[in-house]
Amino acid sequence: MKLATYVHDGRESWGIVTKRGIEDVSAAWPDGPAGLLEAIQAGEPALARLRDIAQAPAAPAIALADVTLRAPIPAPPKLLGLAVTYAAHPRECD
């Protein structure tokens, strides 16, 4: 399942990317998570509901050409970086 945060008609939302386009989760699940991060944090029950929405969409999909994709999680709580990204790097630092 592919999930995305996007802007459509000046409104930021999130949804499921399917062959039809983007299924707007906030329209299909109005009382659900506010965004992708909240859905992931909710765990398996939320992911099961997202699979259901993807399989039986409630509304017409939004064409990918009609949206502007954003970072999947717009304000991540953490960013991690690693100094040792490949095997030769520690030797280069000696």
Image: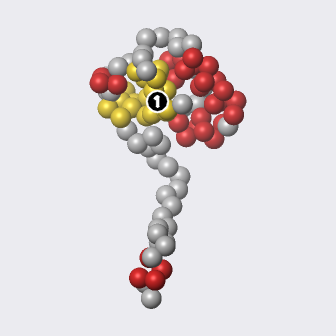
Q: Quadrant of the C terminus?
A: bottom left
* Residue highlighted by disc 1: 14
Question: Quadrant where the N terminus lies?
Answer: top right
- In-front residue for pair 88/17: 88
Q: Is residue 8 visible?
A: no
Identify whether 67 is placed above or below 60: below
State whether residue 64 is above or below residue 76. Answer: above
Which residue is found at the position 52% from the left and 11% from the top?
Answer: 58
Relative placement, left or right, of 30 versus 6 is: right
Instruction: Name the spot of residue 6 as percent of width and height, x first.
Output: 39, 32
Quarter of the image where one finds residue 40: top right
**Residue 69, x across and y down, in percent:** 35, 35
Direction front: furthest residue: 88
| Colouring mode (rainbow / by chain / secondary structure / one colour) | secondary structure
Kind of residue at disc 1: Trp
State the residue lying farthest toward the top.
59
Q: Is residue 59 visible?
A: yes
SS type, badge 1? strand
Q: Residue at x 57, y 13 (%)?
A: 56
Instruction: Determine whether, in the image, residue 48 is placed left or right of residue 23.
Output: right
